[in-house]
């Protein structure tokens, strides 16, 4: 965390990634207006909270401003996809729609890194962020796997489809089983939140929806487990086709700062 108006303003000016910003409700003044100008330029939203809310977070002199700084440097999807194509590879991405549990996020990241996924995509709002718990659960994978923080999953799906990437959503109401999807081509898997799944407006944009069959009495799998099953189905199919992650060269993006 960063505390104080000047410290947060300097972080924004230097380009540091801010995941969340809390500002005291009644905070005013020239320095605050300057801070809001920087936030607008970077497209970062802030949350107005009462002073007691900030005081519960820290006893330090926060001056009415607390920022949570990202543990990694986020990448741009529009940079990642062309770079993967330029390597002669078929892009393989995983999109997380509405997932907020950091432990599930960390577990998914760990699976994705092991499976050779090219990038993990999350939305900028109503989503998990890369914090210490996520880093720990990922067993270091979030230091290696590029993470793209996009304005919306909807926009990410549209960009991927326009780029020639097939987008497949996990949906328990789908007709086809996950083993019936075709993965020997550029592909992106969309995983939704456990309570509502992939949002309806995003589901409609996807090229295909698949389900994991259930034979027990529990309604659904944990999302990190479901993501692992679908991710490794892509690996399985690509291996049969003679194109696997183990044949690929290292990511041109390297470690996440």
Image (tube, grey):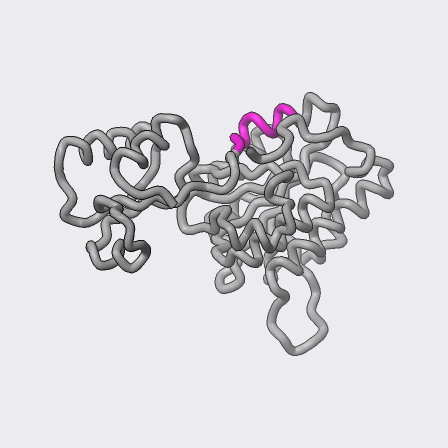
Task: Assess whether residue 79 is covered by the magenta stretch.
Answer: yes
Q: Is residue 115 above or below residue 32?
A: below
Residue 183 position within the rendered picture, expressed as x and y whole percent measured from the top left: 74, 42
Residue extending farthest to the bottom is 217
Q: Nearer the viewer, residue 234 or 72?
A: 72
Q: Is residue 208 left or right of residue 114?
A: left
Q: How many marks?
A: 0
Task: Assess whether residue 150 is covered by the magenta stretch.
Answer: no
The reply to whether residue 153 is in sight is: no
Q: Who's the residue at 60% across and 72% down the image?
A: 219
Residue extending farthest to the front is 60
Residue 144 position within the rendered picture, expressed as x and y whole percent measured from the top left: 64, 38
Magenta extent: 75-83
The reply to whether residue 20 is in sight is: yes
Q: Nearer the viewer, residue 28 or 99?
A: 28
Residue 184 position within the rendered picture, expressed as x and y whole percent measured from the top left: 77, 38
Residue extending farthest to the top is 86
The rendered magenta stretch, by its main secondary structure, is classed as helix
Q: Who's the residue at 25% across and 37% down the image?
A: 5
Q: Quadrant of the C terminus?
A: top right
Q: Who's the residue at 49% across and 49% down the image?
A: 131
Q: Who's the residue at 54% across and 27% down the image?
A: 78
Q: Is residue 257 left or right of residue 14?
A: right
Q: Quadrant of the N terminus?
A: top left
Residue 96 position within the rendered picture, expressed as x and y whole percent measured from the top left: 54, 49
Q: Is residue 226 above or below residue 162?
A: below
């Amino acid at each position: 965390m960063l505390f104080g108006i000047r410290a947060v303003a300097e972080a924004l000016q230097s380009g540091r990634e801010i995941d969340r910003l809390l500002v005291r409700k009644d905070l005013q003044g020239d320095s605050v207006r300057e801070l809001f100008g920087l936030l607008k330029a970077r497209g970062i939203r802030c949350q107005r909270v009462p002073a007691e809310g900030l005081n519960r977070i820290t006893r330090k002199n926060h001056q009415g401003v607390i920022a949570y700084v990202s543990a990694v440097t986020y990448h741009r999807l529009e940079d990642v996809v062309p770079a993967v194509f330029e390597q002669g590879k078929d892009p393989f991405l995983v999109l997380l729609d509405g997932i907020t549990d950091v432990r599930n996020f960390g577990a998914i990241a760990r699976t994705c890194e092991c499976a050779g996924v090219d990038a993990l995509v999350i939305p900028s709002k109503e989503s998990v962020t890369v914090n210490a718990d996520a880093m720990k659960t990922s067993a270091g994978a979030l230091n290696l796997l590029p993470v793209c923080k996009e304005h919306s999953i909807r926009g990410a799906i549209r960009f991927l489809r326009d780029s020639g990437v097939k987008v497949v959503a996990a949906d328990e109401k789908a007709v086809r089983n996950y083993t019936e999807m075709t993965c020997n081509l550029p592909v992106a898997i969309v995983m939704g939140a456990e309570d509502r799944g992939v949002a309806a407006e995003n589901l409609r944009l996807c090229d295909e929806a698949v389900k994991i069959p259930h034979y027990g009495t529990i309604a659904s799998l944990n999302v990190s487990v479901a993501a692992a099953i679908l991710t490794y189905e892509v690996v399985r199919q690509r291996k049969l086709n003679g194109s696997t992650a183990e044949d690929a060269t290292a990511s041109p993006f390297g470690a996440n700062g």
